[in-house]
Image (tube, grey):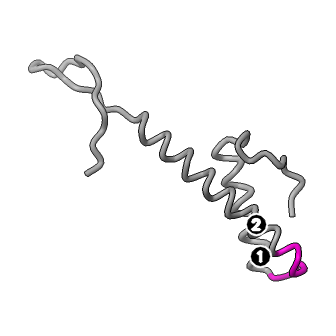
């Protein structure tokens, strides 16, 4: 496992994702003990949830620029992904 901080909530998306990818790689190699694998898996689950939360938060902040009849920006509104 890594020497990463225990408080996952303090990690930014990129750091959390990089740690999650390392955990997946280490588990796929199968060269760690069962106990270490379980700990890594549990941390990986927490990292996954944290990354999902950060992505949902980013999605909620994305806006699209609205244009007036002349094509000039007039404001913003939530972006509809559907």
Q: Are marks 2 and 1 in contact (CB under 8 Å)?
A: yes
Where residue 33 sits in the image (x, y, percent)?
Answer: 90, 80
Q: Which mark is residue 23?
A: 2
Q: On the image, which quarter does residue 7 sit in? A: top right
- Report the side of 4 relative to 71 (left or right): right
Look at the image and give the residue range highlighted in magenta: 30-37
Instruction: Identify the residue shown where x is 31% and y is 34%.
Output: 78
- In front here: 35 or 32? 35
Vertical arrangement, residue 72 with respect to residue 58, above or below: above
Instruction: Identify the residue shown where x is 43% and y is 42%.
Output: 59
Vertical arrangement, residue 31 with respect to residue 73, above or below: below
Where residue 49 sits in the image (x, y, percent)?
Answer: 61, 56
- In front here: 18 or 60? 60
**Which residue is at the far left?**
69
- In front here: 17 or 36? 36
Quadrant location, the N terminus:
bottom right
Instruction: Identify the residue shown where x is 71% and y is 63%.
Output: 44
Q: On the image, which quarter does residue 39 sit in? A: bottom right
Instruction: Identify the residue shown where x is 71% and y is 47%.
Output: 15
Where residue 56 sits in the image (x, y, percent)?
Answer: 48, 46
For label 2, the SS is helix
Which residue is labeled 1 in the image?
Answer: 27
């Amino acid at each position: 496992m890594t020497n990463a901080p225990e408080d996952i909530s303090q990690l930014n998306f990129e750091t959390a994702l990089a740690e999650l990818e390392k955990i997946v790689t280490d588990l796929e190699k199968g060269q760690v003990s069962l106990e270490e694998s379980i700990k890594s898996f549990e941390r990986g689950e927490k990292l996954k949830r944290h990354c999902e939360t950060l992505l949902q938060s980013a999605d909620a902040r994305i806006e699209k620029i609205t244009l007036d009849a002349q094509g000039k920006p007039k404001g913003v509104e939530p972006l509809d992904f559907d």
